[in-house]
């Protein structure tokens, strides 16, 4: 039997829509055609609800706590979690983590694909978010826009 491809969702650790979308996508895979993993990053600890859902679904996960603003240390933590989980597909629920995803893709010898879900309305984007989106558009295999 062929090895299942592994999708790792990279999402915010606290309250927000990322968790709902992520677990809905996992639950939609009724035949469990894929393996799953999760990496949570944010300024607050991983929500207990997310931990419970991961445990119920046998999804390995990691949490990376960071301070407000951009953090190279947090990016490194996300990258290390990616290396440990070894995904075939990275599903980023925000372009914020494109930097560790790019490094993972290079170190996985371009085996990993990067999918990004962009939800921030254009009129609310900061200049840093626009730069992140441009980088995302260059490196991601797919970008899903919700607005």
Image (cartoon, grey):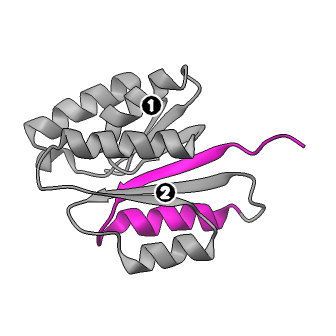
Give the left or right position of residue 18, taking residue 132 as reference: right
Give the left or right position of residue 122, taking residue 109 as reference: left
Front-lying residue, 82 or 26: 82
Give the left or right position of residue 67, taking residue 86 as reference: left
Magenta residues, start to end: 1-29
Residue 66: within the magenta?
no
**Upstream in sequence: badge 1 or badge 2:** 2
Q: Which residue is found at the position 49% from the left and 29% from the top? A: 141
The image shows residue 46, relative to residue 127, as above or below, that is below
Residue that extends furthest to the right in the rendered view of this protein: 1
Q: Which residue is found at the position 49% from the left and 61% from the top? A: 22
| Coordinates of residue 41 in the picture (x, y in percent) | 31, 56
Front-lying residue, 87 or 147: 87
| Coordinates of residue 11 in the picture (x, y in percent) | 38, 56
Front-lying residue, 1 or 133: 1
Q: Which mark is residue 67?
A: none
Q: Quadrant of residue 48?
A: bottom left
| Coordinates of residue 4 in the picture (x, y in percent) | 75, 45
SS for tag 2?
strand
| Coordinates of residue 32 in the picture (x, y in percent) | 74, 59
Marks 1,2: beta carbons within 8 A: no
Say which residue label 2 marks.
Answer: 38
Q: Which mark is residue 104?
A: 1
The image shows residue 92, relative to residue 143, as above or below, that is below
Q: CA distance from mark 1 to mark 2?
A: 15 Å
Residue 144 appears in view: no
Q: Which residue is found at the position 38% from the left and 62% from the top? A: 18
């Amino acid at each position: 039997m062929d090895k299942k491809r592994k999708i790792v969702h990279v999402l915010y650790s606290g309250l927000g829509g990322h968790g709902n979308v992520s677990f809905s996508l996992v639950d939609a895979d009724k035949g469990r055609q894929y393996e799953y993993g999760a990496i949570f990053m944010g300024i607050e600890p991983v929500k207990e609800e997310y931990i419970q859902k991961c445990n119920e679904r046998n999804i390995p996960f990691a949490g990376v706590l960071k301070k407000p603003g951009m953090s190279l240390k947090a990016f490194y933590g996300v990258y290390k979690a990616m290396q440990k989980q070894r995904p075939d597909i990275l599903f980023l629920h925000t372009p914020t983590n494109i930097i560790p995803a790019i490094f993972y893709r290079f170190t996985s010898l371009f085996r990993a694909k990067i999918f990004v879900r962009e939800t921030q309305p254009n009129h609310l984007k900061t200049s840093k978010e626009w730069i992140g989106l441009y980088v995302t558009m260059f490196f991601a295999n797919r970008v899903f826009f919700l607005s």
